[in-house]
Image (cartoon, rainbow, N blue to C red):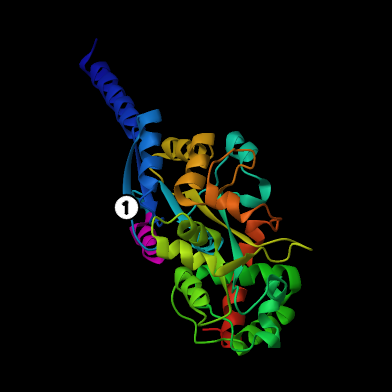
Amino acid sequence: MTATRFSLLALTLLASLGAQAADKELNLYSARHYQTDEKLYDNFTQQTGIRINRIEGKEDELMERIRNEGANSPADVFITVDAARLAQADALGLFAPVRSKLLESRIPAHLRSDTWFAFSTRARVIIYNRASLKAEDVASYASLADPRLKGKVCSRSGAHPYNLSLVASLIAHDGEAKTEAWARGVVANFARAPKGGDTDQIKAVAAGECGVAVSNTYYLARLIRSDRMDDRRMMERVGIVWPNQAERGTHINISGAGMVKTAKHPEAAVRFLEYLASDEAQRYFAEGNNEWPAVTDVATNNPALAAMGKFKADALPIGTIASQVAAAQRLLDRAGYR
């Protein structure tokens, strides 16, 4: 063998070994801040031998980091919560299209796009103080603008992605003019200026500071399952309504992920996305973090979710909601929903 042929063979072998080594790691940028996700990631490594290098941060910070890193970004997968944030990442051109027959067969069409996939869902429900209101008083999202609720509505910021996604869904269903009139009605009904997170709204409703608010279901399930007696007693004062059951159903949001367009480990990235759609991972989302599986036929065991009962979910495509997020922000600004 000549020295030249030997050198070429050695380079080929080194390149092959480098590719194999690359397949054994995955760089995950995560805006999911749940300690319970540790087991989810550990199980992936145990099953595949692929080590996850995780960078955690706030959504906007991670998206800006990926943009600034450009072609040199080590990020393979970006995972976050809420369609509004995934839409923002998509609009910034951070994701690459993913073709996977497994994902297309497992994740319902209305819970995915060409570049990102939902892996769990959570519903945005209406909660009310049992002592001051009845379920029929707040049967739909439209109820929140009813003048009879003046001085009774609490809310987190209108700029928060959870609310942006809800309002985006209302725009998709009802149009901007009707939705803006609704938003102005909600603002007129505020018990106080918007502040805090969903748990703060639950506490305010339970304490009677306000009569009604909106919350993601996993916050409610967390309190129902709490080891603290005070939390469980608080939830006895709070009623839960699945809005719009007589028509389109309750708005749902998601936790989802996509492969970054500059991914250095694309095969590992797709493998990770496919793992998140597995029965095991789907059950983990439900039982570990009180979210519903995106894969509809996965059986789960979460007493708190079961206690909330079955409901009709709005099947509006998540991609359609995402496309209206910018319009939702402008509308809420005009309505004074800060």
Q: Give the main secondary structure, helix, strand or loop, of the magenta stretch.
A: helix
The location of residue 6, given as percent across then percent down, is 24, 16
Q: Is residue 33 magenta?
A: no
The location of residue 53, given as percent across then percent down, is 31, 44
Q: What's the residue type where badge 1 is placed? A: Ile
Q: Is residue 144 visible?
A: yes
Image quadrant containing the N terminus: top left
| Residue under label 1 | 55
Q: Secondary structure at mark 1?
A: strand
* Closer-to-camera residue (223/90): 223
Q: In the displayed structure, would residue 102 be above or below residue 194? A: above
Q: In the displayed structure, would residue 127 be above or below residue 330? A: above
| The quadrant where residue 9 appears | top left
> What stretch of residues is rendered in magenta?
60-70
The location of residue 245, given as percent across then percent down, is 74, 62
> Residue drawn at (55%, 60%), measured in percent from left and top?
217
Label 1: few (<14), some or many (≥20) within 10 Å?
Answer: few
